[in-house]
Every structure is written in structure tokens, then in C-alpha cells.
């Protein structure tokens, strides 16, 4: 299984679409702070990221997207 966040990958054909891919980025200086920020995010939100409509380029929020 190849999981990507693009429509197509050269040299491969799409066999099955599971759904949309969403990701969040935690930025900070230093490796220790990155690890701590990631752990705090998981602890505070269960790893789930909620997006404002402006962050999805006008598309539906992940909660409203068809599955």
C-alpha cells in the first residue's frame, strides 16, 4: 500500500481510494521541543486536528468531508 497526499504518482496506477489525507505540522526549535510539542498535542487533543474553513482552501472541514 502506498499512501500519498497527491492526486497521482508517476509510475503507479490508482487501485483504490480510501479518502482524503489531512496532516498537521508542529514547528519549534530543537529536537527536544519538537518531541515535547507532539506529545502535548496528542495529550491535549488525542492527536486530532480540527481545521477552520479558511485553512482548507475553501473546501469542507474534515468532519464534513464525505467518507
Image (spheres, rainbow, N blue to C red):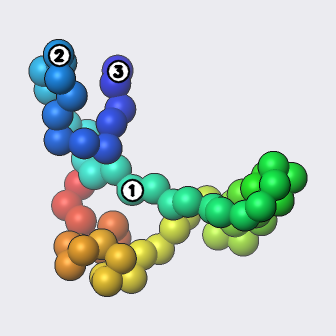
Q: Judge whether residue 15 can be spotted in this image.
A: no
Element type at mark 3: loop
Q: Which residue is mark 3?
A: 1
Q: Quadrant of the N terminus?
A: top left
Q: Relative to 14, say whether 39 is above or below.
A: below
Q: Judge whether residue 6 can be spotted in this image.
A: yes
Residue 47 spot, x, y in % from top left: 61, 59
Q: Residues within 10 Å of mark 1 (few under 14, many from 20)?
A: few
Q: CA distance from mark 2 to mark 1?
A: 24 Å
CB-based contact (under 8 Å), mark 3 and mark 2: no
Q: CA distance from mark 3 to mark 1?
A: 18 Å
- Residue drawn at (86%, 52%), measured in percent from left and top? 32
Q: CA distance from mark 3 to mark 2?
A: 14 Å
Q: Quadrant of the C terminus?
A: bottom left
Q: Which residue is mark 1?
A: 22
Residue 36 spot, x, y in % from top left: 82, 59
**Which-is-in-front pick, marks 2 and 1?**
2
**Which-is-in-front pick, marks 3 and 2?**
2
Residue 38 spot, x, y in % from top left: 72, 57
The part of the image, by quadrant, that contains residue 30 is bottom right
Front residue of 4/66: it is: 4
Element type at mark 2: loop
Element type at mark 1: loop
> Farthest right residue?
32
CB-based contact (under 8 Å), mark 3 and mark 1: no
- Residue drawn at (17%, 41%), measured in percent from left and top? 7
Q: Residues within 10 Å of mark 2 (few under 14, many from 20)?
A: few
Q: Which residue is mark 2?
A: 11
**12 left or right, relative to 29:** left
Amino acid at each position: 500500500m502506498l499512501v500519498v497526499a497527491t492526486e497521482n504518482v508517476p509510475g503507479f496506477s490508482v487501485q483504490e481510494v480510501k479518502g482524503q489525507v489531512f496532516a498537521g505540522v508542529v514547528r519549534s526549535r530543537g529536537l527536544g521541543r519538537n518531541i515535547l510539542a507532539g506529545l502535548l498535542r496528542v495529550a491535549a487533543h488525542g492527536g486530532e486536528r480540527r481545521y477552520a474553513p479558511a485553512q482548507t482552501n475553501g473546501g469542507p472541514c474534515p468532519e464534513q468531508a464525505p467518507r
